[in-house]
Image: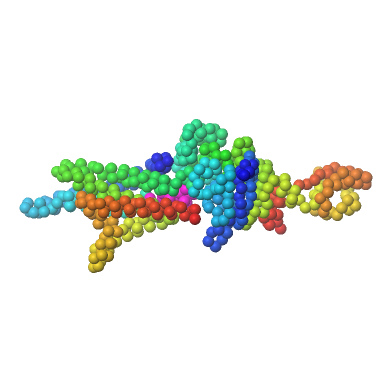
Amino acid sequence: MVNMDKILVVDGITKEYPGRTAVSNVSFEVKKGSIHGFLGPNGAGKSTTMKMIAGLLPATTGSITLFGEKVEPEKLKMKNLIGLLPESAPLYLDMTVENYLKLVAKLHGVKETQLQVDKVMTELSLTEVRKRIIGNLSKGYRQRVGLAQALVFDAPFLILDEPTNGLDPQTVVELREFIKKLAANKTILFSSHVLPEVEQLCDQITIIHQGRIRASGDLQEIHRKFRQGLVLKVGIGEYETLPDLTTLGKYEVTQEHIVGKEKQFHLVFEDDRDCRSEIGKLVISKGVNLLTLQVESPELEDIFLHMTEQKK
Amino acid sequence: MIWTLWKKEIDSYFSSPLAYVLIGLFSLISGTFFFNLLITYTDGIQAMPQQMTEQISFVEEVVLRLFANINFLFLLFIPLITMKLFSEERRLETIDLYWMSPVREWQVVLAKGLAAFTLILAMLFMTMLFPLIIWGVGVKDFSLLGAAYLSVTLNACCYISLGLFCSSLSANQIIAALLSVLGIMFLWMITWGGHLNSNYLVAEIFTYIGITSHFERILRGLIGTQDIIYYFTFIFFFGFLTVKSLSRRNW
């Protein structure tokens, strides 16, 4: 029985080249209707994995199942299910935007070519440059054309390899909003180096490093797993002293700094138990002004650096 | 699908100056050859006693030499046309656009081959002025001219097929072009090797494998089944190798 809630199942794929292994025993799943973030430093194996999912490269071992069917480079009918924007978009620089998109639509057997091309150009604000040669466009517009080629045949599954890389902030915001809208009726596998962007867009993530999966699943779940013990931000008056809290459990002060007229501490309790109310009572009972008391979640960046062993 | 791919290639040729420059240059050089051959022929006729002039054949001295020269020009022009067909697409990674689409390798190879062939036909079309001039000087044997055109067209198809294969081997256009030139020269040299070999069987094999003997037979209007089989086998063989070379990415 195929679980259609999982659009994509990557099961233990390995890609070996002579003398090196690009990805090793990679497994993860992508849920229907989600934007799944795919994170990893340069050379981690993201693009290779994405190309294997798109059927551009065969896996040495393992299997990839999309919509319940095994992905293989020779399976032509799968090609209309996957819209891929590779890191380097396959653009013919000597063609006009419109002709290029028409070519892609025809290659995918789109019946109403002009209608579909017009629709995608409107969605991506390409109408005004439709007659322009792609080679003469700015990087932002070229990236939009690249995204348009992945969308023009209305594939239900999109693979976007660093779509906002190197673009100006305005274009990044526009594209991000557009990708969010796309998730309403498409499933998206999305790689990016911009971690706040991933946090903003994705509900699920997979972290890959040196060709191996370091974490995969629900973003909140990964946050929770990564958090070892309870991290609290406690703010008191600028000239006050934080009372001893050891009666509530063993803890460590990892950060201390002044923010305005407030002295803030980051406390890491060994125990995961939420003891905020006791802390509140204890601090106030000592006559200290309690200005801030909140649970701190680790930033995705912390998790990413931890997983990819780059933290010093 | 093949029509879509062919049209894309043709648009690509004619949207850049390359096609126009190649056609112009080819017309100029082949025209110069034709002019020189005519001058040499008429000078030769005028310098000879009247009774000997019939021994010099216009067809032999002008028509056959002209088409042999056009065949030689292909050594330079066809690698220039075919070198970018796969090399550039691999270098720019645009070839992935095809592999992301429901398109078979053979369809891409056939479309690119046909597009290159169309450009060669456009070049040969520019030489159609020569038959008119030849007709003007009294040569009415158009079947011979047809055979001559057929011979260079078939050779062009072989060179395109070889050029496509070379282009699929490397992402570097210069290497692809050099491989094509060396490949075409090798095809010519095999025939010469056959002529020089004293062993009858080896000589026959070399002569059959080489392209020159087939070209010369058809050029003289002697179109045999073995020649047609040779050309079609050659074109299909290198087309097949190109498809296999492109399929390497799936290994």
* x and y, in percent, of residue A185 in the image: 61, 36
Give yes or no for residue A223 being in the magenta stretch. no
Q: Residue at x 82, y 54 (%)?
A: A270
- Residue at screen point 26% across, 60% down: B207
Drawn side of residue A269 relative to residue B159, left or right: right
Q: Taken as a whole, is the magenta stretch helix, strand or loop?
A: helix
Residue visible at 80% across and 49% down in the picture? A231
Q: Nearer the viewer, residue B104 or A103?
A: B104
Color theme of the render: rainbow
> What range of the chain is rendered magenta?
B82-96
Q: x and y percent of residue A264 in the render?
A: 82, 47
Q: What residue appears at the point 34 percent right and 51 percent down from the top-left corner? A: B235
Is residue A210 visible in the rendered image? The answer is: yes
Q: Residue A155's x, y, as percent? A: 55, 39
How many marks are shown on the rendered structure?
0
Residue at far left of view: B51
Does B92 lie within the magenta span? Answer: yes
Taking the view exactly as shown, the residue that stands out farthest to the bottom is B198
For residue B56, side relative to residue B214 (left or right): left
- Asked whether A270 or A300 is in front, the reply is A270
Task: Say above or below: A300 vs A118.
Answer: below
Q: Which residue lies furthest to the front in this view?
A: A1
Quarter of the figure that contains the N terminus of chain B: top left
* Residue B15 can be seen in this image: no
x and y percentages locating residue A23 in the rendered image: 59, 56
Residue B69 is left or right of residue A215, and the answer is left
